[in-house]
Image (spheres, rainbow, N blue to C red):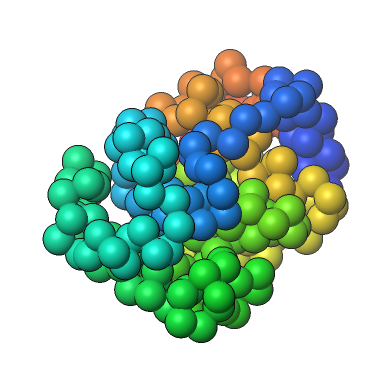
Amino acid sequence: MNEIQKAKKILKILNKTYPKIKVPLRSRNVFTLLISVLLSAQCTDVNVNNVTKSIYPKYYKPEHFTKLGRRRIEKLIKRIGIFRVKAKSIYNLSKILINEYGSKVPKTFEELEKLPGVGHKTASVVMSQGFGHPAFAIDTHIHRLAQRWGLTNGKNVVQTEKDLKRLFPKKTWNKLHLQIIYYGREYCKARDCYGLTCKICTSCYPNRKKPVKTKKA
Ligand code: SF4
């Protein structure tokens, strides 16, 4: 089975397994989505949601965070990993949004990626979930699954993004990114590969005998 055939099969299985998909990070507008995605680096979505559920009802605009100041932002997010660095980014990016973008989140990759603490992955999630722009945010989980499924050679996340964008139609990207994340959490976990039982691998690799190993991103 070639890559294109595999991609088609995988898409079919994922659409059947996750016909409707919920955005895992809670937010109340594009700005809070940006903050949540930034907070989720090296941290679980559940942890981020637990922390932000008491922040967003009160603080949900850049002005709220500049008024709070760095120290008070740190206190609010202290249950999240590397909170000092993240608090600094939230404070500085809020200032930039107020001064340069009329308190709005910019709608281009270029502008988003210039904001403190915002890399290509964060920008991709905001473009896709916040603005509905086709994007394929690749994190270490998607990178792992794409390798295990033989859709990329696994060099790095940049290559994986190129390969997945080539194999899947643009209109599927936004949903597919979440479907792969959900499948990874449920079946294709970082440490365990069941090798011979999961739907995707039994369909794409009927002759596989052993679990597969993956390279890190
Ligand atoms: S067998 Fe399951 S866990 Fe292993 S690579 Fe395939 S989908 Fe992932």
Q: Position of residue 33 (x, y in %)?
A: 51, 50
Judged left or right of residue 171, residue 23 is left
Q: Is residue 78 left or right of residue 109?
A: left
Q: Quadrant of residue 117?
A: bottom left
Q: Is residue 83 above or below residue 79?
A: below
In the image, residue 173 above or below residue 70: above
Q: Residue furthest bottom?
A: 100
| Residue 82 seen in render | no
Percent coordinates x, y for residue 201 in the rendering: 65, 28
Residue at far top of view: 197
Q: Is residue 207 above or below residue 119?
A: above
Residue ID at (51%, 42%): 27
The quarter of the image holding the N terminus is top right
Q: Quadrant of residue 152?
A: bottom right
Instruction: Judge from the rendering whether residue 43 lies leftward or rightward of residue 4; answer left or right.
Output: left
Residue at 16% across / 49% down in the picture? 75
- Residue at (46%, 82%) from the top-left corner? 99
* Viewer-side residue, 177 vs 2: 177
Give the quarter of the figure containing the C terminus: bottom left
Q: Nearest the camera: 11 or 203?
A: 11
